[in-house]
Image: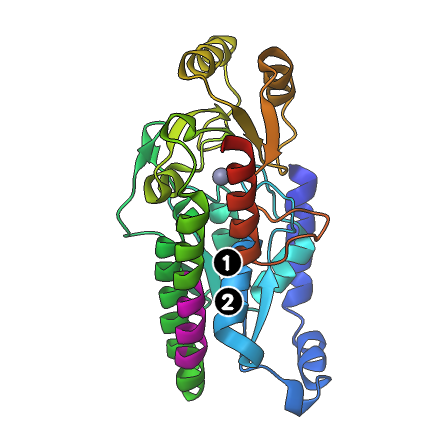
Amino acid sequence: MYARLVRLAIALALLGSAPLIGGLVTARPTSAQPAFTATATIGVFADFARQVGGARVEVFQLLGDGVDPHEYQMTPSDLVNVSRSQVFLYNGLGFEPFLNQVFQAMPPGITRVALAEGLPTLTVDGAPDPHLWLDPQLAQRYVERIRDAFSAQDPAGAAEYQANAARYLAELEALDRELEAQLADIPPAHRQLVTTHNAFAYFARRYGFAVIGAVLSSEAREPSPGELIALLQQIRSAGARALFVEPQFDSRQVAQLVEQTQLRVMPLYSDALPPDGSIRSYIDMMRANARNIAAALR
Ligand code: ZN
């Protein structure tokens, strides 16, 4: 922990060296120079930011694909990238436990945009569930907030952000209808989700599923032996057919549960895009989720 703080301090000291930063900025060709830089915490929000920002906004993704936000710790090079930004996009509602560290370290004057705070939430594990973007209708609220934040940051680009957002919002609307149709013919008795961590309440509400349980809590806390036994009983009494495994977690308890239940295992994506680069966008991620749920539960 101490070594990490020292590295952060060194990174900040380097950042304060104006000639270095000035040199980096002027080295860029004028024609390709974006209006500003935005940092987004996870790949899904970075995708939203690129959709809205187009060529006018340089987008930096703080957490690499496959990184679990519940466990992430900031590195000095991450801080350098955050500090180059004018806008910082994050979910809020406790989704990013590292936020305090980032806010303390980053220079003042960077606009902070909480994408989910203030939207109506569901309570999961005794706290507001932060995973609102897994409902494509709520994902649209995120895109609108990014559009408004970018327009305020760069008024000259407002018409472009407006047009980009309108196009992308229509795509999300179409995605929502596509998922609804794809998931519609799963029999009512099969409409049960058991996942690695408790992230699918909004998705389940939107498409008519019941979340039977999750191995890890909404904040990715590991279960006690008692909680694991209770989950096993819930799975058996509900007659759940599949366990949906989120690749960003490497959980011993998940492997144990798979062994004990003999459930069909399917991947499902929530907080992180897969590290192998096979899925690069929110829309493709949601399509993969619907495809895997339909394949496992029909
Ligand atoms: Zn999560």
How packed mark 2 is, by other alpha carbons closer than 10 Å (few <14, some 14-19, many 20 or more), is many
Image position, residue 78 (x, y; %): 64, 56
Name the residue tied to disc 1. 45
Image position, residue 68 (x, y; %): 59, 40
Q: Tell me, yes or no, whether the two marked residues, 1 and 2, touch with CB atoms within 8 Å.
A: yes
The residue sitting at 40% across, 85% down in the picture is 159
Name the residue tied to disc 2. 49
Residue 281, quarter of the rendered image: bottom right
Look at the image and tell me in which quarter the N terminus lies: top right
The residue sitting at 66% across, 61% down in the picture is 13
Q: Main secondary structure of the magenta part?
A: helix
Range of magenta residues: 162-172
Label 1, label 2: how many angstroms apart (C-alpha)? 6 Å
From this viewpoint, is residue 13 visible?
A: yes
User: Viewed as shown, does residue 25 lie left or right of 191?
Assistant: right
Secondary structure of the residue carrying tag 1 is helix
